[in-house]
Amino acid sequence: MKILLIGHGKMGKAIEEYAIQRGHSLVATVDVNDTLMPTLAEQADVAIEFTHPEAAFENIKFCLEHNLPVLSGTTGWLDKLSEIEKICQENDGTFLYASNFSIGVNLFFKLNKFLAKLMSPHDLYKPSMVEVHHTHKKDAPSGTAITLAEGVIEEHIGYSSWKNDSNVKDNEVPITSERIGEIPGTHKITYKSEVDQISIEHEAYSRDGFVQGAVLVAEWLPAQKGVVKIDDFLKL
Ligand SMILES: NC(=O)c1ccc[n+]([C@@H]2O[C@H](COP(=O)([O-])OP(=O)(O)OC[C@H]3O[C@@H](n4cnc5c(N)ncnc54)[C@H](O)[C@@H]3O)[C@@H](O)[C@H]2O)c1
Ligand SMILES: O=C(O)C1=N[C@H](C(=O)O)CCC1
């Protein structure tokens, strides 16, 4: 498979290495000082985009307007997601966004929803979330934390929004973001009462899970149509 790799930072470089290991080739790597040229899109089967919150929208739009299936793992640009989904439909394209490409985290998303549903009738237990990442991370809260909070809001009658603060209103899920050293990504959700607490936690040991997931999804994506989800790929 021929990949157009957009973003050649920590994720881009690791994806390049893993994609080559799996027998794929790169049409080009495009970073901040490069230009996305239509000829690059013409030569590729799929684009993988891991860049910056300010850059994702234009990069994805370019791919969709040039008939190239694209997956993006860039976080921090969700306010423009619905616009991209519209552009995807208008161009009869293929697009997938996932806040986290690790299989473990996507299973954890399901566990989170199950727990939220279970806790919904028990308002003595108040949920809160802590996410910990490396100090280079540009966005807070993490995209994964937002997906987890959305999962709680979907399943728990007591919650309708989230806030990146520990000081919240009754109907808000509090998210605390910590930035420490080189931590790849840890997410913990706790339901606390006066007498006890229940926690679930996912800890990534490295970026390998994100990288492997992104390449496997990229292999599957060209045969799909429209706005697709990682759940479709994982059959979750
Ligand atoms: N979904 C996931 O599984 C997952 C996993 C890890 C990281 N991420 C997200 O992916 C993004 C990138 O993470 P990273 O750790 O590789 O960051 P990074 O800062 O190491 O790399 C980002 C790269 O994008 C480049 N870039 C910036 N603007 C660009 C543009 N307009 N066009 C092309 N390239 C551009 C930067 O120069 C840099 O090389 C972040 O948003 C992060 O939160 C998602
Ligand atoms: O390293 C990052 O940056 C990560 N970003 C994603 C997020 O915001 O959830 C996934 C975990 C790693």
Image: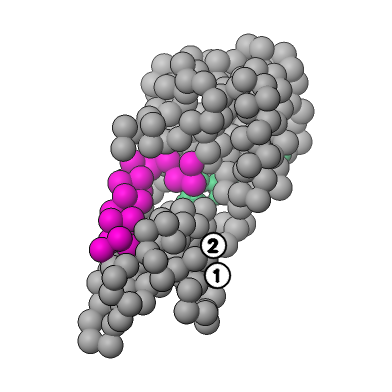
The magenta region covers 98-118
Between the residue at mark 1 and the residue at mark 2, the CA separation in whole angstroms equals 6 Å
Q: Quadrant of the rendered structure where residue 165 is?
A: bottom right
Residue type for callout 2? Pro
Q: Name the residue rendered at 33%, 33% in the picture.
A: 234
Q: Name the residue rendered at 31%, 73% in the picture.
A: 191
The residue that label 2 is drawn on is 141
Q: Nearer the viewer, residue 93 or 201?
A: 93
Residue type for callout 1? Asn
Magenta highlight on residue 192:
no
Magenta highlight on residue 114:
yes
Instruction: Identify the mark at residue 164; answer none if there is no mark.
Output: 1
Task: Give how far across and how far down residue 55 sits, in percent.
Answer: 70, 42
Element under disc 1: loop
Relative to 110, is 128 above or below?
below
Q: Are marks 1 and 2 in contact (CB under 8 Å)?
A: yes
Judge whether residue 74 can be spotted in this image: yes
Quadrant where the C terminus sits is top left
